[in-house]
Image (tube, coloured by chain):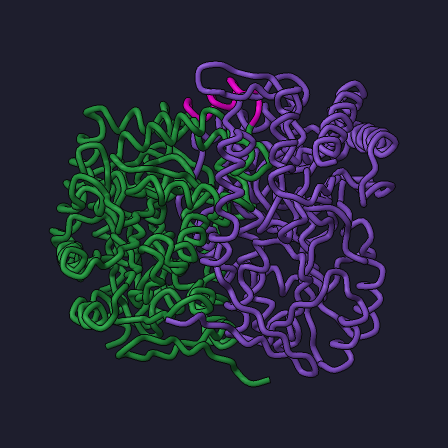
Chain colours: A purple, B green
Amino acid sequence: MTENSIQERGAGISVTSSRNTRAMIDKAGPQFDLAYQSGVMGLSARPMKERFVSIDLGGSNKCVLDFVRCSYLGLDNHPEIVAGAIDAVTQYKSLHWSCARTRLNFALLTTLENELADLFQARVITYSSVLAANMSALPLIASGHLTGNKKPVMVFDRFAHATLAFHKPTLAAETAVITIDHNDVSMLEQICKQNPCVAYICDGVYSMGGTAPLEALLSLQQRYGLFLYIDDAHGVSLFGRQGEGFVRSQVPDSVGGRTIIAASLGKGFGASGGLLMLGSNEHEKLFRRFAIAHAFSASLNLAGVGAALASAKLHRTAELLRRQIFLGERIEQFDRLCKTDQSGLPLPIRFLKIGDETTTISAARTLIDRGYYTSAVFFPTVPQGEAGLRLCLSASHTKEGIEGLCHALDEVLRQDKEIRR
Amino acid sequence: MTENSIQERGAGISVTSSRNTRAMIDKAGPQFDLAYQSGVMGLSARPMKERFVSIDLGGSNKCVLDFVRCSYLGLDNHPEIVAGAIDAVTQYKSLHWSCARTRLNFALLTTLENELADLFQARVITYSSVLAANMSALPLIASGHLTGNKKPVMVFDRFAHATLAFHKPTLAAETAVITIDHNDVSMLEQICKQNPCVAYICDGVYSMGGTAPLEALLSLQQRYGLFLYIDDAHGVSLFGRQGEGFVRSQVPDSVGGRTIIAASLGKGFGASGGLLMLGSNEHEKLFRRFAIAHAFSASLNLAGVGAALASAKLHRTAELLRRQIFLGERIEQFDRLCKTDQSGLPLPIRFLKIGDETTTISAARTLIDRGYYTSAVFFPTVPQGEAGLRLCLSASHTKEGIEGLCHALDEVLRQDKEIRR
């Protein structure tokens, strides 16, 4: 059988994209083998105080400072959020109802969605994960029902998250799908000029660093009616007076009928699950009826609901700002000690490019030995030959922790250069 | 822009399938409007004792006996499962870690997966939902990496669950995809004869009633090496000495390298989340590296993990068999009182076909008024003009509850016939 490919059609621009899971696995296999053998991936652990975790080494344990988890405000072990999870389950004497949300919902989930709507000043629907939220939203955008019954040309940023890019062929069965270079606003404008209806799919804060050019996108929306679907999983809670996130805090008063923002209830928010912020009653109605995860999968469980309610409450207190400030200080400290392409950005993700995959995995291993867990990132997450370490900074890392990490990074990378000399 | 379609290619048989979310929404819209206006969909409620729930009517509440939830063994409010959820969160002082499973996992999740592996005698990987499990598995099957590097022709049963069928175009970008009629074993055999490598995608227990022809499928597997991916979300826990489920309890000793079974940790199992049962070490390794939900989404939260561990423990006690027997008795009782196409099958789902959508919705409304909540099912879940009521029976429904439901059904449907005369 030959490789099949989906021809993505755009008026004016034509891009061919094909999925090839087989080739991807063949290419990435040896690096994964090495990473697992080196003990830098797929670890089992128990949480310790602050950002420390105790890793299972099969018999023994090792305590390391974690820079892998995306709990940027350090809320994932906040006692009030943990108590919120337990309270909800205790009160309802149930964890989970196995039925579609189009049938039956925990009343507490309705309370949560109303609370989040008020917090983020948008209509909010929750999902069991951002993956489920993204899968639900994209076909509804493709249908044209959100854009006055005109099917949009769907334009993806080349770096849009894997849980968005996954669905391109499914969307191409409904409408035209184009992939453009990362943050290529001028190409996007060209497409807007040539097509009556365009939807742009991108991340707010990118998981490997950087952000969407939000101002430019909002300007295209104003001039051409561009529909925006922005996955702000990594931006929520970190920005805005009530933690509205990187995207929502920059979008005018109302989300409006031409923007949808996806966000995580894990990561910065510190609970579990995902959500969509919608701008119109019509959109909300459509999603509550036809979104695949709403109609054919179950809701967030009640522990997640309770945790999210507790976190929403925290988002209205001075503790949020305090944690946002702590995080900013740790980021600045890191940038003073270690230069990356993201230096100076107010975001908690830093990507330290090393290049070679083997060197990257070996560096991650040495860092674990010195007490620091970082993500060794390589193909297919980044292109081949562009491997590196991803570091997620958080408000509950201490000054000493960041200092120690940077010192260890410096030594490990200097060592590597000396070996390669 | 014209409708695009994906040409699904099969050697010998060619089937064209196209997605058309717009047309689906336009067709289904009026029925959804009526169902929501009638208050038979999207309800908010609190759990009460046994299978009763208290529905929010905006100001007041109404207590109804629920036949919507899929907790077939009545485990979703079992005190030990609820306690398991609370214990795990209490012990770890955390609900959720926001990171890919390829990075960091709660040690208790590793414990759960080992426990489930032993319970179901298969290699087990858990997911936050069955939706995430299905999305993860299908492209890996399409890649050919599970079938000796031969890309299989992927054959879908026409009634395969929506979270499977959704991905057909994405899979068609990798290999040939064919949809065949429900349980059409002879067509499947013909495809097996004409193609060196075939994978069949179907449900074990169908959500609207009936099962896969498992014996015939296993025979095709033996004769042609057919690869089977079976979603047994509705079958798990209900069958087998340790609740292995409809499919696993009929598959020989080892799952083997040519079968994958998906199952729910909600529904019969009574916790939350989903899982895959795999038959080979190589398959497990591949899934733990490349499955999209493993690499790019988060795990089941810790409350789900704790609940599932408690349920797994219950699955090893006499209580499982007792509940399986209770369920069987309730099913037999129902069949004596109310005839459906599923009468006599040892499955808890009954579909009472009414035909007309408006009549169905009105019947569901009258039933709520009489104290029974059932699912009014219509297009797109079933074809137009084939609407009806879905009833999920459970081990914790009482004799009186089933009797009351059947009596109410009888009256409501007789009334309807008299009106239509």
Q: Quadrant of the C terminus of chain A?
A: top right
In the rendered image, residue A391, in percent from the top left (x then y), is placed at 70, 35
Residue A204 in view here: yes
Seen at 69% across and 45% down, the residue is A355
The residue closer to the viewer here, B47 or B8, is B8
Coordinates of residue A89 in the picture (x, y in percent)? 49, 29
Q: Dominant secondary structure of the magenta stretch? A: helix
A10 to the left or right of B259 = right
Q: Quadrant of the N terminus of chain A?
A: bottom left
Asked if the stretch drawn in magenta spans residue B82, the answer is: no
The image position of residue A83, as x and y in percent, is 59, 23
The stretch in magenta equals: B83-94
Looking at the picture, how far across and down is residue B208, in whole percent?
Answer: 29, 58
Of A202 and A103, nearer the camera is A202
Q: Residue at x 48, y 29 (%)?
A: B303
Question: Which residue is painted at 54% across and 73% down in the image?
Answer: A172
Give the side of residue A9 with respect to residue B176, left or right.
right
Left or right: residue B253 compared with residue A349: left
User: What residue appears at the point 66 percent right and 24 percent down from the top-left corner?
Assistant: A372
Q: Residue furthest top?
A: A60
Query: Quadrant of the rendered structure where residue B223 is?
Result: bottom left
User: Which of the 4 image quadrants contains residue B125?
Assistant: top left
Residue B340 appears anywhere in the view:
no
Q: Can residue B88 be found in the magenta stretch?
A: yes
